[in-house]
């Protein structure tokens, strides 16, 4: 009796890693419509890192490597590689924006701790911060344009009738799409809402009512809070509190983005190894 053995490729039932990828995709997709508070953004970054970790495991499977290494599929493999590089660029833009903002925050905090350092000194630092924010928003606006261009790329189709190959490439494209959406949320959060609050008191009341209303994620943007507070500065103590909150927020997001950056590099290396095999 002849026995037919399968290679270490995907069986008829979905591989456990593919199921795990699907679960992460589902969780991240369902979170897209929820609050875009700092804690929500941090959770999305952590969730995306978990997803990309699963993707890297998926790329180590022989079935995945065989599918992407096929000559007729290398176009899509190269597109995935290009998409990974673009995600690295967007991640780097977000990191630079956070770093630049944190540096200005620390300068402002230093002035305030020195009992204002003179009205002129504080005014100059506030102007420096607001000017830096304009530069950050300009950089983010450009990155958002590139991001939208990636979203408008052609959808996956293949002349190859191998359903396993089609499923693998389509799944990786789904991962890229979710990654783009999350990075879009991160960049939008750093940039702040387009509508400008009329006064600091209005923002303060909104923040307090949100915090009192529920313990879950409130739609509070720490960047917008500080922007509004500095444009109508009334209390050094209040400004210091807002700056401290924003610095803590930036620290959390920097850690999340740094982990994501490293994971994206690993993913890109895995794709390169497959193409160069």
Image (cartoon, grey):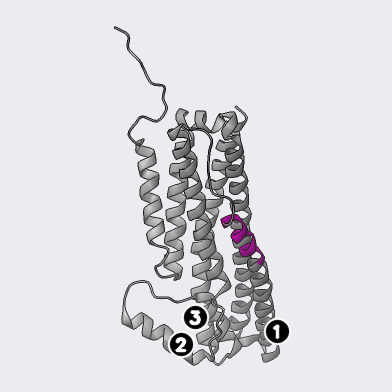
Closer to us: 122 or 4: 4
Tell whether label 2 touches label 3 (CB within 8 Å): no
Tell whether label 1 touches label 3 (CB within 8 Å): no
**Front of the two marks 3 and 2:** 2
Other residues around mark 2 within 10 Å, as few (<14) / some (14–19) / many (≥20): some
Tell whether label 1 touches label 2 (CB within 8 Å): no
C-alpha separation, residue under disc 2 versus residue under disc 1: 24 Å
Percent coordinates x, y for residue 21 in the rendering: 40, 45
Picture quadrant of residue 13: top left
Other residues around mark 1 within 10 Å, as few (<14) / some (14–19) / many (≥20): few
Closer to us: 33 or 163: 163
- Name the residue at 36% across, 29% down: 11
- Name the residue at 35% across, 36% down: 14
Percent coordinates x, y for residue 164 in the rendering: 43, 34
Identify the residue position indicated by label 2 in the image: 204
Q: Magenta region, mostly helix, strand or loop? A: helix
**Mark drawn on residue 241:** 3
Mark sitting earlier along the chain (3/2): 2
Mark sitting earlier along the chain (2/1): 1
**Mark drawn on residue 205:** none
62 left or right, relative to 191: left
C-alpha separation, residue under disc 3 versus residue under disc 1: 20 Å
Other residues around mark 3 within 10 Å, as few (<14) / some (14–19) / many (≥20): few
Q: Could you say whether the residue bearing mark 1 is in a helix, strand or loop?
A: helix
Identify the residue position indicated by label 1 in the image: 124
Q: Is residue 88 above or below residue 35?
A: above
C-alpha separation, residue under disc 3 versus residue under disc 2: 12 Å
């Amino acid at each position: 009796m002849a026995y037919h053995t399968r290679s270490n490729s995907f069986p008829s039932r979905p591989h456990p890693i593919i199921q795990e990828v699907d679960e992460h995709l589902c969780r991240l997709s369902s979170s897209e419509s929820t609050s875009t508070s700092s804690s929500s953004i941090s959770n999305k970054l952590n969730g995306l890192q978990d997803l990309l970790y699963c993707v890297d495991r998926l790329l180590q499977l022989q079935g995945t490597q065989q599918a992407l290494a096929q000559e007729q599929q290398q176009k899509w493999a190269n597109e995935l590689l290009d998409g990974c590089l673009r995600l690295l660029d967007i991640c780097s833009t977000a990191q630079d924006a956070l770093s630049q903002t944190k540096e200005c925050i620390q300068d402002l905090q230093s002035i305030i701790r020195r009992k204002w350092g003179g009205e002129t000194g504080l005014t100059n630092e506030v102007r420096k911060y607001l000017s830096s924010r304009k530069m950050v928003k300009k950089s983010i606006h450009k990155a958002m344009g590139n991001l939208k261009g990636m979203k408008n790329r052609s959808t996956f189709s293949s002349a190859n009738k191998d359903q396993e190959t089609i499923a693998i490439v389509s799944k990786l494209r789904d991962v890229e799409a979710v990654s783009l959406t999350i990075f879009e949320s991160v960049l939008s959060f750093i940039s702040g809402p387009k509508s400008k609050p009329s006064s600091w008191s209005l923002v303060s009341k909104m923040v307090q009512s949100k915090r009192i209303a529920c313990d879950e994620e409130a739609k509070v943007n720490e960047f917008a809070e500080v922007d509004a507070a500095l444009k109508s500065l009334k209390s050094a103590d209040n400004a210091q509190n807002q700056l401290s909150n924003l610095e803590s927020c930036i620290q959390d997001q920097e850690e999340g983005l740094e982990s994501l950056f490293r994971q994206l590099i690993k993913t890109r290396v895995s794709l390169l190894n497959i193409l160069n095999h």
